[in-house]
């Protein structure tokens, strides 16, 4: 499906200001364990734009489901309003994901996000917040992204979604961000669209942000996972391994497919990755299993099948969760 690009603006039919001089109201729905880096990177460009223009171009509110404080992943306690008390005033509503979500709370978050979408606001996410948007059915037909660590598990759980490895995606009334300082770039893009590129550059300079990245930029961690610096033979072998995680290929077949002998392939892997191809393949599958177990709702038996382990190998998967690096191979 072709990527659709357009400015993120609230529904024009909504009873909300549409002038470029009108204040844009943001609401950040906090999930326990959220990334403070992502949240700060989203808010600070808005604050700086207000200061530089000496007017309130943007406002923001922190909310939780029940109005109780929420703890970020660094332990800082954040005061929050009750979501239902402030939701209808927001033009942009972002869910700020954490490392893990209490499964007993997920249904309430999903209901809240569906209510938010019905207000006509632009709906967005920071980091793992994309999981909640996807489970709420709010990303169907939209281009989206998520932090590169979660990308494999996310695409396994939501195979019908268009998820990229980009730093952020803005698609009509959806804005998804991979997290971290990528939120700065996403907000700078919004500032540029609404108030001009000159203001966006001035805001970027306040944070020593030398280059404003756009939505075509890929996440560095995602690029590193693609092993761009490795010899072509290794890259092609890894591509085949990733494409056949559920039904692992014999190493001899991988060698044949890339016109290399098994011995040549083993020498390359040992030299550049300090692991044999077979060992690396197992690591790849265990790491995929680990991501699915930690970040997705896929049953353990299905995860075993999706990563090429017999359904009786649940103990191996559980061990992978406790120690995902037990078969780790590091580049030299």
Image (cartoon, rainbow, N blue to C red):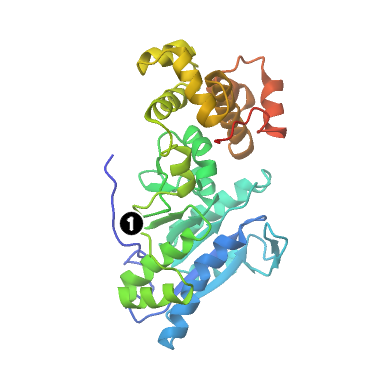
Q: In front here: 196 or 251? A: 251
Q: Position of residue 119 (x, y in %)?
A: 44, 62
Is any part of residue 121 visible from this angle?
no
Q: Position of residue 298 (x, y in %)?
A: 58, 31
Q: In front here: 168 or 181? A: 181
Q: Position of residue 138 (x, y in %)?
A: 44, 48
Find the residue positioned furthest to the bottom: 54
Vertical order, 53 against 288 (above or below):
below
Is any part of residue 48 visible from this angle?
yes
Vertical order, 192 against 280 (above or below):
below
Q: Is residue 156 left or right of residue 196?
A: right
Q: Position of residue 191 (x, y in %)?
A: 37, 71
Q: Residue at x 43, y 66 (%)?
A: 187
The quadrant of the image that shows the C terminus is top right
Q: Is residue 312 left or right of residue 239?
A: right
Element type at marker 1?
Answer: loop
The quadrant of the image that shows the N terminus is top left
**Tally of marks:** 1
Q: Residue at x 44, y 68 (%)?
A: 209
Q: Residue at x 57, y 25 (%)?
A: 275
Q: In front here: 161 or 47? A: 47
Q: Neighbour class for label 1 at 10 Å: few (<14), some, many (≥20)?
A: some
Q: Residue at x 41, y 68 (%)?
A: 210
Q: Please name the residue that numbered disc 1 is placed on.
A: 172
């Amino acid at each position: 499906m072709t990527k659709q690009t357009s400015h993120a603006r609230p529904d024009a039919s909504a009873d909300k200001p549409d002038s470029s001089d009108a204040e844009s109201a943001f609401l950040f729905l906090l999930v326990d364990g959220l990334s403070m880096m992502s949240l700060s990177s989203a808010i600070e460009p808005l604050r700086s734009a207000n200061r530089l223009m000496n007017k309130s171009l943007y406002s923001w509110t922190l909310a939780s489901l029940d109005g109780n404080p929420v703890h970020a992943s660094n332990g800082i306690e954040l005061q929050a309003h009750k979501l239902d008390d402030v939701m209808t005033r927001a033009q942009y509503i972002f869910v700020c994901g954490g490392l893990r979500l209490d499964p007993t709370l997920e249904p309430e978050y999903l209901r809240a996000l569906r209510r938010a979408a019905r207000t006509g606001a632009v709906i967005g996410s920071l980091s793992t917040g994309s999981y909640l948007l996807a489970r709420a059915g709010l990303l169907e037909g939209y281009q989206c992204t998520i932090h590169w660590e979660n990308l494999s598990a996310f695409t396994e759980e939501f195979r019908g979604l268009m998820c990229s490895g980009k730093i952020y995606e803005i698609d009509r009334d959806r804005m998804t961000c991979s997290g971290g300082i990528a939120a700065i770039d996403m907000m700078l893009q919004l500032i540029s669209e609404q108030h001009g590129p000159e203001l966006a550059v001035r805001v970027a300079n306040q944070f020593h942000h030398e280059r404003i990245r756009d939505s075509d930029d890929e996440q560095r961690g995602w690029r590193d996972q693609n092993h761009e610096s490795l010899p072509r033979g290794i890259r092609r072998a890894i591509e085949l391994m990733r494409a056949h995680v559920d039904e692992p290929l014999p190493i001899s077949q991988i060698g044949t497919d890339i016109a290399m002998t098994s011995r040549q392939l083993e020498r390359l892997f040992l030299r550049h990755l300090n692991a044999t191809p077979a060992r690396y393949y197992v690591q790849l599958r265990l790491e995929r299993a680990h991501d699915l177990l930690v970040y997705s709702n896929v049953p353990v038996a299905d995860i075993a099948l999706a990563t090429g382990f017999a359904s009786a190998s649940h103990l191996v998967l559980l061990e992978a969760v406790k120690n995902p690096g037990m078969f780790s191979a590091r580049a030299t």
